[in-house]
Amino acid sequence: MNWKLVFLLSLFGLAMGFATVSLIPSTVEPFFWLVIFIFCAYVIARKAPGKYFLHGFMVSIFNCVWITLAHASMFYTYAANHPEYMQMVEGLPPALAGHPRRLMFLIGPISGVIFGLILGLFSWIAGLIARRLS
């Protein structure tokens, strides 16, 4: 594993964590993530010493830590700019709906694993393509 590569690529998650608090609306956020995932998969395919899927997965795990911390630390700004999050929380059972900031610490890791599977798959496919081209 190239942990330096994983950490450096996860800094996109740190930047997106802060940017999505108030700058990037949730309607266009997926397009930013698609570009980031394609770029990360390309870099992993070129620089990782194998285990492309695992590298991509771990980048997303690190991303979920950065994003969760950024969103939770600026919760009130995030909530003001993302009313859809607050509407989603209102539909949950009272034990969860009463703590929307704490809920981020549950949703973050789940999202990290799901998106880790996606980035891992992107990275694995990019690794296959890179091997065939060389």
Image: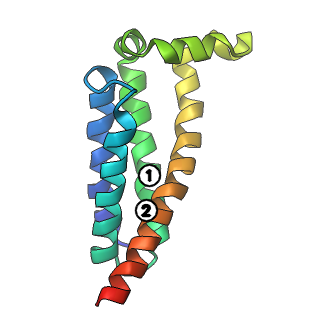
Image position of 97 with respect to 16: above or below? above
Q: Which residue is mark 2?
A: 56
Which residue is found at the position 29% from the left and 65% from the top?
Answer: 5
The foreground one among 30 and 2 is: 30
Give residue 59's quadrant in the image: bottom left
Label 2 and label 1: CA atoms lie apart by: 7 Å
Bin the neighbour count of mark 2 within 10 Å (Cα to Cα): few under 14, some 14-19, many 20 and up.
Answer: many
Asked whether the residues under the numbered discs 2 and 1 touch, taking CB atoms below 8 Å apart as contact, a structural biologist would say yes
- SS under mark 1: helix
Label 2: which secondary element:
helix
Which residue appears at 51% of the width and 18% of the height? 85
119 over 105 or under it: above or below: below
In the image, which disc is placed on residue 60?
1
In this view, the residue in front, 62 or 22, is: 22
Position of 94 with respect to 19 (left or right) is right
The reply to whether residue 99 is in sight is no
Three-letter code for the amino acid on which mark 1 is drawn: Ser
Image quarter (top left, top right, bottom left or bottom right) of the C terminus: bottom left
Query: What residue is shown at x 35% (from left), y 18% (from top)?
Result: 74
> In the image, what residue type sits under mark 2?
Gly
Q: Position of residue 130 (x, y in %)?
A: 33, 81
Q: Nearer the viewer, residue 31 or 103?
A: 31
**x 30%, y 50%: residue:** 35
Residue 111: percent from the left, percent from the top?
54, 41
The vertical placement of 39 against 79, above or below, is below
Would residue 97 be seen by someone viewing this image from the given angle?
yes
**Is the residue marked by circle 1 packed among few (<14), some (14-19), or many (20+) residues within 10 Å?**
many
Q: Position of residue 92 (x, y in %)?
A: 70, 16
